[in-house]
Image (tube, rainbow, N blue to C red):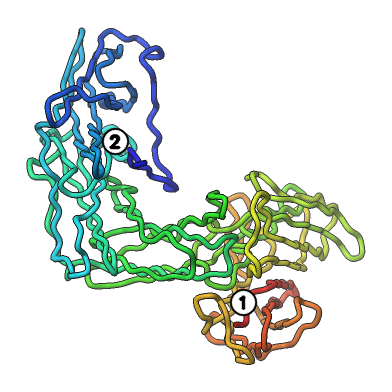
């Protein structure tokens, strides 16, 4: 079964307001849009009608009359015609219509021109490019792709009906597949009489994907690259699939220079999309390359720190086990136990989860200034699936000791640590009985505008490793290098290695972070 429409997932977009004919207000006119196929017969399509300049959007079947307020509109659609062999044909078209009284217009696929895109392709590319294209309302918002209609097909089976109106934009993405992938995007004002373009490999940039295994909640990774122009246009979010396969794997995509969003989705054996995310957007220049990692060891807490506000110590138990190469939106759901204590007194203990919840928060009132201890014990938690045997980064703990005053709102002067074991293979394994260098960085991030955030300097960093799941710990040599530290871990003959750091500042605040099964031995 072929997918019938372009789908853009994961990047925030302006969502058009959709209204049916029955819900329109102050309707004083009507519009019927007939769509004809490439042989002249009527073809049933879904037509998007966008009011200019308000952006009020109506979805209607072709041939059905819709009541509208008088005014100017854009009617746009993808005229898809199936075939017994192949993917059939797509003809993308739009027409600017002044609606008053009873108005009828026709979008005729016979007027469509082939979208032709050429590349001085290497020998391993033997087929035509797959092209995704859409027409957009250019002036109703700052994000034209939110008001669009489009489809995809192989070159030779995708057409666009020319229209020079400046109220329209036309965007496309062409992708050639061989040993590497080649992707070209282009946007125009209006729909050109000769849609498409010519591209040279020497003028492309390179994006490399390195997908490691062992850390994710499942083994299947679907990676992609989305267009993210600095000024949104009709190419925004057009997406090129990179590879959908079991990790580990690598892939290379050569793309037109510009701004691109790498992404991945992780699928469980039952087909559920259970993870993934959107790393930082990359600006790629002609002749230059960049690498995006997914799934490298080790996954750990990424962003959230305790805060003191409203006479309470608060903590958001989110992004506690996440891919640091992706960021907070690449974190997995967890279940955690959070405990706040003062001396030998437990102030509050609570078990939380962010599974199917975005508002989990720990908050405990405090009545006096002093030294407090906040501990977090987080495990990955995702009901309905079976985790892979030997999954890494399965548990993370935090142990923060800091001074707090209920009358002074602030971000607690503590740290999160990132561990980056170097020299591992693509399965996040170190060689038996080897030595692994672990890059250690202690970081802090502002938690929002409502609480005071101060710079805190790490005075010392200590480091340990465990080869028996945390039963015993062995101190590692630590070397300070610039803004980071390096710890040298002597690996066991088999199993997995847990890592622990302790960061202190000059005031005595202490941050202890432990990551279980940080990497494997193999």
The label on residue 124 is none
- Please give the count of numbered marks on the rendered protein: 2
Residue under the image location 65 percent in, 67 percent down: 389
Mark 1 burial class by Cα count in 10 Å: few <14, some 14-19, many 20+: many
Q: Taking 277 as reference, is 35 left or right?
A: left
Relative to 242, residue 67 above or below: above
Q: Which residue is mark 2?
A: 148
Residue under the image location 81 percent in, 58 percent down: 339
Q: Taking 82 as reference, is 353 left or right?
A: right
Depth order, front residue of 234/372:
234
Query: Which picture quadrant has residue 337?
Result: bottom right
Q: Taking 305 as reference, is 110 left or right?
A: left
Task: Tell me where residue 54 appears, x and y as whole percent.
Answer: 31, 26
User: Disc 1 or 2, which lies upstream in sequence?
Assistant: 2
Task: Tell me where residue 31 appears, x and y as whole percent.
Answer: 24, 15
Relative to 279, residue 97 above or below: above
What SS does tag 2 mark?
Answer: strand
What SS does tag 1 mark?
Answer: strand
Task: Tell me where residue 432 appears, x and y as whole percent.
Answer: 62, 89
Depth order, front residue of 34/192:
34
Specify the quadrant that holds the C terminus: bottom right
Specify the quadrant that holds the N terminus: top left
Q: CA distance from mark 1 to mark 2?
A: 46 Å
Residue under the image location 31 percent in, 53 percent down: 227
Depth order, front residue of 81/333:
81
Mark 2 burial class by Cα count in 10 Å: few <14, some 14-19, many 20+: many
Q: Which residue is mark 1?
A: 519
Task: Tell me where residue 501 appears, x and y as whole percent.
Answer: 69, 78
Query: Which picture quadrant has residue 455?
Result: bottom right
């Amino acid at each position: 079964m072929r997918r019938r429409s372009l789908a853009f997932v994961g990047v925030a977009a302006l969502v058009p307001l959709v209204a049916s004919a029955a819900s329109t207000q102050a309707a004083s006119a009507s519009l019927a849009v007939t769509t004809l196929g490439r042989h002249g017969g009527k073809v049933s399509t879904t037509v998007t009608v966008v009011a200019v300049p308000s952006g009020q959007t109506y979805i209607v079947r072709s041939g059905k009359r819709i009541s509208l307020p008088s005014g100017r509109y854009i009617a746009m659609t993808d005229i898809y015609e199936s075939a017994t062999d192949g993917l059939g044909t797509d003809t993308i078209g739009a027409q600017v219509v002044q609606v008053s009284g009873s108005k009828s217009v026709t979008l005729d696929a016979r007027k469509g021109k082939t979208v032709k895109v050429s590349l001085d392709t290497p020998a391993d590319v033997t087929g035509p490019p797959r092209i995704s294209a859409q027409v957009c309302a250019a002036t109703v918002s700052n994000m034209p792709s939110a008001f669009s209609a489009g489809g995809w097909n192989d070159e030779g089976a995708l057409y666009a009906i020319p229209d020079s109106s400046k109220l329209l934009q036309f965007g496309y993405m062409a992708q050639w597949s061989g040993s590497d992938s080649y992707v070209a995007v282009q946007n125009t004002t209006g729909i050109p009489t000769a849609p498409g373009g010519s591209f040279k490999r020497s003028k492309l940039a390179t994006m490399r994907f390195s997908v490691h295994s062992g850390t994710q909640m499942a083994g299947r990774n679907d990676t992609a690259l989305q267009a993210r122009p600095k000024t949104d246009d009709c190419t925004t979010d057009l997406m090129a699939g990179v590879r959908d396969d079991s990790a580990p794997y690598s892939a290379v995509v050569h793309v037109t220079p510009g701004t691109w969003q790498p992404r991945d989705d992780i699928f469980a054996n039952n087909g559920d999309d259970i993870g993934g995310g959107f790393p930082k957007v990359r600006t790629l220049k002609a002749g230059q390359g960049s690498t995006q990692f997914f799934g490298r060891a080790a996954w750990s807490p990424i962003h959230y720190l305790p805060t003191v506000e409203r006479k309470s110590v608060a903590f958001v138990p989110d992004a506690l086990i996440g891919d640091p190469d992706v960021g907070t939106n690449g974190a997995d759901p967890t279940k955690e136990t959070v405990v706040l204590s003062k001396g030998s007194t437990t102030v509050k203990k609570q078990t939380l989860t962010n599974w199917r919840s975005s508002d989990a928060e720990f908050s405990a009132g405090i009545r006096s200034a002093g030294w407090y201890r906040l501990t977090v014990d987080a495990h990955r938690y995702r009901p309905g699936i079976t985790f892979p045997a030997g999954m890494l980064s399965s548990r993370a703990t935090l142990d923060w000791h800091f001074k707090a005053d209920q009358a002074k709102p602030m971000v607690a002067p503590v740290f999160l640590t990132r561990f980056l074991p170097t020299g591992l293979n693509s399965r996040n394994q170190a060689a038996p009985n080897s030595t692994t260098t672990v890059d250690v960085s202690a970081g802090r991030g502002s938690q929002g505008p409502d609480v005071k955030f101060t710079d805190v300097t790490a005075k010392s960093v200590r480091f340990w490793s465990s080869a028996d799941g945390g039963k015993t710990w062995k101190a590692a040599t630590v070397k300070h290098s610039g803004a980071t530290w390096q710890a040298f871990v002597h690996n066991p003959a088999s199993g997995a290695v847990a890592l622990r750091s302790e960061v202190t500042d000059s005031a005595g605040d202490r941050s202890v972070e432990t990551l279980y099964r940080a990497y494997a031995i193999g």
